[in-house]
Image (cartoon, rainbow, N blue to C red):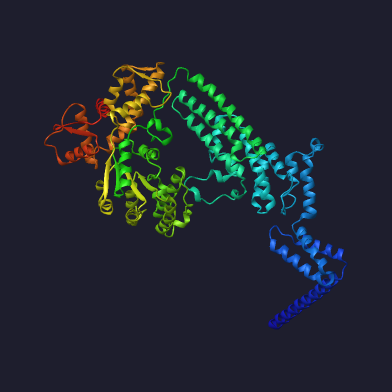
């Protein structure tokens, strides 16, 4: 009984559906016939209503289909006149009428001269325009970008809400408004800068507004040239791409100047930014390809920044009266922009170039104690090499490079691309990071094959600094031994590639994997500066350096440091500090003594590193090595009948230049280290 009832219900439902379908078909058929029999003006009106009602947020093809269908329906009766249906339907589908005409009136209205005093405030006007009134903005509204920029001046948070809504809509009208408004919005924000802290903040991803507006300019360095670009990237005008990175660079230089160790150096850094960068940028604006309205937009930014820096300069000048410039750089490597502070090492550079020109193709190993200037040397190679040899710097301490083989290959390609570009050679765009994941070495070699053709006769010297980190990554299973196979393959088969590994140890000291994979190896030990180079560093570290030394002071510093670069910089900086504390421009023996004590405090990490890391390899050796150093500091010699552990510690310290042997007697290589250990022993 129940089954029969269900069957009857199904039959009734099917019958009803069929009846409705037939009825709709009849209605549509008569409707179509009826519409095509209407007069042409009424038929056009029907077309407008259909197109207007079916217009979606997106769907260009649907508009064309509607236009084509309606044209075909009217062609039999109206002939060629039906072709008018196409533009009318498409214009209506794009909401050019009536929406666009009405919205255009609203957007243009506030800008009319005789209406301005009665016009609504920008935010109120903005609320009466898309995307609030309609999302179907296919064409840009006149004056829409100016209203948006004015709204940001009125209320940033409220205007940002509208901005995000526009950003989420892919329609050309919104995209055009954003593209046209962004330069003015950003220029307005930069013109409101009142302090150097605010000025510096424009380089930071933590800035409350700018990274939201133009995230392209705030991408992490780890992502590099091939990072996924922001949604706004296609909508950034050339004007913004030209000027904003330059202003960010100026802000970074201001930050660097403020981080200087004393007021005199901060003053000089700010003056350089003011004169060499801001004033030069102001004069360069026409030559950068900017149009007069664009120049007019950015000139107030430059003027405002100049005023902010001038105010800070006045404050720094008050603080720096009689203060000596401290150009010495303690701890961080000396980069190429501080070339006056980098002295010597010419013979190392000449030796590398000679080997490259001779094409004997060894693998170069630059080794030596920490803080002896290896990284500074690598940073300064571009100015020491001829133009047909391009040094490429790769810092193996970066976890982004040693996390996997794919990361290593991507990091190598990115370093080659960036450093070549900085030296005036543009190579093919590197592959994106995800392309290295599946087959990193294939992607690496494919890019190298293409890139090396662009180099023509130039050679690449790949400098892998702190290369021991590769071994650490292999031990931790982040990278496999396949990397050694690949490096050896590149060395053997790519004639334009040279490798220089820089670190504390030689390949032999690191382990069998290294020495077996890299057979043709030339070790180059970097230790101390030559006395003349060290003397030049103390006397002429900067063009504006005016500090003087009493007779014998410079020679005493060379004796204390043995011309070790880090210790020279350490005592140099400490002597300037003492001169400023005592308001003098001359270093006396008393001030040198005070500078040594100051150096022991500021150089504590360096001395402690020697004490804990370079007195032995095992815990037992380290204790034995420290005991030996304490004896030497007191003027005692190691026991001749020392045990194996003490002997290993002694040999380890000899190999790492902590101590030396002269005429069967042992002593510290560097007198200043001996003084620190002796002070520690008496503490």
Q: Nearer the viewer, residue 464 or 384?
A: 384
Which quadrant, please, contains the N terminus? Answer: bottom right
Quarter of image, res 339? top left
- Residue 59 location, x and y as percent? 69, 61
Total marks shown come to 0
Extreme residue toward the left, this view: 641
Q: Nearer the viewer, residue 542 or 590?
A: 542
- Residue 565 location, x and y as percent? 32, 31
What residue is rendered at 53% in x and 24% in y?
313
Which quadrant, please, contains the C terminus? Answer: top left
In the drawing, does residue 376 fall left or right of residue 14? left
* Above or below 404: residue 463: above
In the drawing, does residue 259 fall left or right of residue 46? left
Residue 503 in sight here: no
Quarter of image, res 652? top left
In the drawing, does residue 114 fall left or right of residue 647? right
What residue is rendered at 68% in x and 58% in y?
58
- Residue 417 location, x and y as percent? 45, 48
In the drawing, does residue 162 fall left or right of residue 497? right
Extreme residue toward the right, this view: 39
* Above or below 348: residue 486: below
- Residue 87 location, x and y as percent? 77, 60
Q: Nearer the viewer, residue 540 or 640?
A: 540
Residue 404 in sight here: yes
């Amino acid at each position: 009984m129940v089954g029969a009832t269900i069957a009857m219900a199904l039959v009734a439902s099917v019958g009803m559906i069929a009846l409705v379908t037939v009825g709709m078909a009849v209605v549509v058929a008569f409707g179509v016939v009826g519409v095509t029999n209407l007069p042409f003006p009424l038929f056009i009106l029907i077309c407008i209503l259909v197109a207007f009602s079916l217009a979606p947020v997106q769907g260009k093809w649907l508009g064309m289909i509607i236009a084509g269908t309606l044209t075909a329906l009217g062609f039999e009766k109206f002939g060629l006149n039906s072709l008018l249906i196409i533009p009318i339907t498409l214009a209506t589908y794009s909401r050019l009428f009536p929406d666009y005409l009405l919205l255009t009136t609203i957007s243009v209205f506030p800008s009319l001269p005789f209406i301005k005093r009665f016009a609504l405030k920008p935010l109120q006007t903005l609320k009466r325009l898309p995307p609030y009134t309609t999302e179907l903005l296919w064409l840009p509204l006149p004056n829409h970008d100016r209203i948006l920029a004015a709204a940001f001046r009125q209320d940033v948070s409220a205007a940002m809400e509208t901005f995000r809504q526009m950003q989420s809509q892919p329609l050309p009208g919104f995209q055009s408004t954003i593209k046209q408004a962004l330069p003015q919005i950003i220029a307005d924000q930069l013109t409101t800068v009142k302090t150097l802290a605010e000025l510096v903040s424009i380089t930071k991803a933590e800035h409350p507004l700018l990274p939201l507006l133009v995230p392209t300019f705030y991408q992490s360095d780890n992502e590099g040239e091939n990072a996924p670009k922001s949604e706004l990237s296609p909508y950034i005008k050339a004007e913004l791409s030209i000027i904003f990175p330059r202003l960010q660079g100026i802000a970074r230089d201001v930050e660097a100047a403020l981080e200087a160790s004393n007021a005199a150096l901060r003053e000089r850094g700010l003056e350089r930014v003011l004169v060499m960068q801001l004033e030069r940028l102001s004069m360069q604006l026409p030559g950068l390809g900017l149009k007069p309205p664009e120049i007019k937009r950015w000139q107030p930014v430059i003027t405002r920044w100049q005023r902010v820096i001038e105010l800070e300069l006045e404050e720094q000048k008050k603080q720096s009266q009689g203060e000596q410039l401290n150009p010495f750089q303690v701890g961080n490597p000396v980069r190429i922009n501080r070339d006056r502070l980098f002295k010597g090492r010419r013979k190392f550079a000449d030796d590398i170039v000679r080997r490259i020109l001779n094409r004997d193709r060894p693998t170069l190993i630059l080794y030596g104690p920490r803080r002896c200037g290896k990284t500074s040397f690598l940073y300064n190679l571009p100015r020491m090499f001829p133009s047909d040899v391009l040094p490429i710097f790769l810092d193996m301490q970066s976890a982004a490079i040693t996390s996997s083989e794919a990361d290593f290959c991507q990091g190598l390609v990115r370093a080659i691309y960036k450093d070549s570009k900085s030296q005036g050679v543009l190579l093919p765009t590197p592959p994106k990071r995800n392309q290295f994941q599946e087959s990193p070495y294939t992607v690496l070699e494919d890019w190298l094959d293409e890139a090396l053709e662009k180099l023509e006769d130039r050679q690449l010297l790949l400098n892998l600094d702190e290369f021991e980190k590769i071994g650490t990554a292999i031990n931790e299973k982040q990278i496999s031994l396949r990397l050694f196979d690949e490096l050896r393959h590149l060395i053997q088969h790519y004639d334009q590639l040279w490798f220089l590994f820089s670190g504390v140890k030689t390949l032999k000291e690191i382990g069998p994997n290294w020495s077996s994979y890299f057979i043709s190896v030339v070790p180059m030990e970097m230790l101390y500066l030559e006395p003349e180079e060290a003397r030049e560093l103390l006397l002429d570290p900067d063009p504006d350096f005016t500090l003087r030394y009493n007779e014998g002071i410079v020679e005493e510093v060379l004796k204390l440091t043995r011309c070790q670069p880090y210790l020279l910089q350490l005592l140099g900086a400490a002597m300037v500090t003492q001169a400023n504390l005592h308001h003098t421009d001359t270093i006396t023996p008393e001030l040198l003594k005070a500078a040594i004590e100051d150096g022991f405090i500021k150089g504590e990490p360096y001395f402690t590193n020697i004490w804990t890391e370079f007195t032995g390899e095992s815990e037992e050796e380290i204790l034995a090595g420290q005991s030996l150093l304490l004896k030497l500091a007191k003027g005692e010699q190691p026991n001749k009948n020392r045990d194996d552990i003490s002997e290993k510690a002694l040999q380890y310290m000899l190999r790492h230049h902590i101590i030396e042997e002269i005429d069967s007697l042992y002593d510290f290589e560097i007198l200043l280290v001996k003084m620190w250990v002796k002070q520690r022993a008496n503490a």
